[in-house]
Image: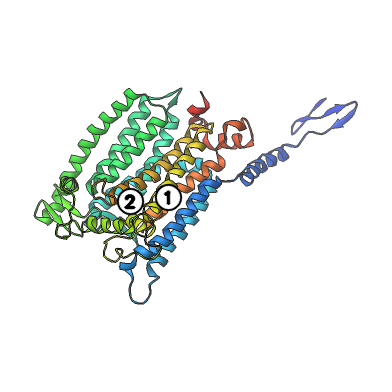
Amino acid sequence: MAQNNQNGLYIRESIDGVPVEPPAPKKARKASRKTNETVATALKSDPYIWGIYLMLLLFSIIELYSASAAEVVGSNVYAPLIRHGMFLGIGFVLLWLVQRTHYGYITRFAGLIGILSWLALAYSTFMGVEINGAQRAFMLGPFTVQPPEIVKLTVIIWLAAILAKSQKRHDVKTSGIVISAVIVAAFGGLLALNGLTNTLLVMVVSISMFLICGIPVKKIVAIFLIYGALFGVFYLFTRVINKSSEFDKVGQTEEVVNTGGGDHTIGSQTHKNRIVRHFIGVHPEDELTDENRQVVMAKLAQARGGVFGKGLGNSRESVRLPLAFSDYIYSIVIEELGLVGGILLMILYLLLLARAGYVAYHLTRALPAFLILGCAILIVFQALVHMAIVTGLFPVSGQPLPLISKGGTSVLVMSVAIGIMLSVSRYATRQAEGKSDRDNVEARHLGEDLNAINASADN
């Protein structure tokens, strides 16, 4: 039985003459809010990702203390560790906040974050402060901010949002592919002015995301062509600006401004010279110079470590190896823990990628799968590039070991990346759950444009 009153429709049902009152509208709204709170409280982040992160922190604290021997000032031998621990602590707070925040909030502002990151990168490239001979940073109060580290994660978040919006069945809209390629080329052109390693890193991660989202091979080839054309034009344009503003001060084609580690040269022949020196290599009879010091000392540290290492805290080369605490910290890991310790650390990173792949495969929506895999690929690939440089497989270039090398910006960015992975594992719906409270909450956070189905759930 239903009755109308002045305030609207009032429904009263009766069973065998006994009236049964329906829930009031206010109670229904309150119940909906409680559903969101209950879902958020009941969900847990992935314990395996948490475990890998905590083990990396342990590696970081122990190894950076050993690798910072050359940085010890006065009687305070703990000063480098305290500084690094401060950034690890801030990173942990950021990670905790991000993993408690629905990943949908982050992707909602992907475009704005991307534009601000590009502007920060442009500013640091042309007007920033020099670090080890390369304009890569700007000062924010007492802190040094390195936009290239921020850009790596920004590109992943932006591409994940664009590719999720452009999803078709086992394919991606051409407009989404073109926009993504233009974004990568725009960032890559600026990154290339400070070294090709970060540029290649961003491009490889983006190609990996394209493959994950199901783009056919013929479109991948088209992406390479777009990369080549746009990156070439943008690189040449920025190169002309850089030459007119910076190279005139140098007065020569190349100037060595540091000790051979990282991106420490300025000039048109920089990248070519690094590749040439890499293939020439170093030999026992070579004289020790500023150009080969990093490579020689890194190889000595690894040779001294052998299979099982010299033990924690027993590094000798950390005092003589420039930038042992950042660009070459993996050589100190091998010196102290040996080949076994170096392999175990590599496996730890690979386990992070494997776990991300497992979680992504079981998600119902495409966006969280792209996010968790993109973040994992970035962390793992950067770690492998660092290890390849230290062991002599790649030419010399500055690339920190994620969460272990000293560097405030890098530590904070990688902490946020892990936080996004944990947020996905916490809030994204699994295929086995079907329609549930978590699925309803996720759908409301993403909206219609980001609700594309994960390809693995659509097989």
Q: Could you tell me how far apart the alpha carbons at marks 1 and 2 are, in whole angstroms?
A: 31 Å
Answer with the quarter of the image where residue 249 lies: bottom left
Q: For the residue marked with disc 1, what is the amino acid?
A: Leu
**Under tag 2, what secondary structure?**
helix
Counting residues from the N terminus, which is met first, the one under dot 1 or under dot 2? 2
Q: Where, by quadrant of the figure, is residue 232 drawn?
A: top left
In this view, the residue farthest toward the right is: 17
Point out the residue furthest to the left here. 251
Q: Of 65 and 156, which appears nearest the observer?
A: 65
Q: Position of residue 293 (x, y in %)?
A: 21, 59
* Residue 363 higher or lower than 323, as above or below: above
Task: Give the residue at mark 2.
Answer: 147
Relative to residue 25, is residue 2 depicted above or below?
above
Q: Mark 1 points at which residue?
A: 344
Element type at mark 1: helix
Closer to the camera in the image, 362 or 130 = 362
Q: Where is residue 204 in the image (x, y as percent from the top left)?
A: 33, 38
Residue at 44% in and 23% down: 170
**323 w.r.t. 436: above or below:** below
Circles 1 and 2: CB atoms closer than 8 Å = no
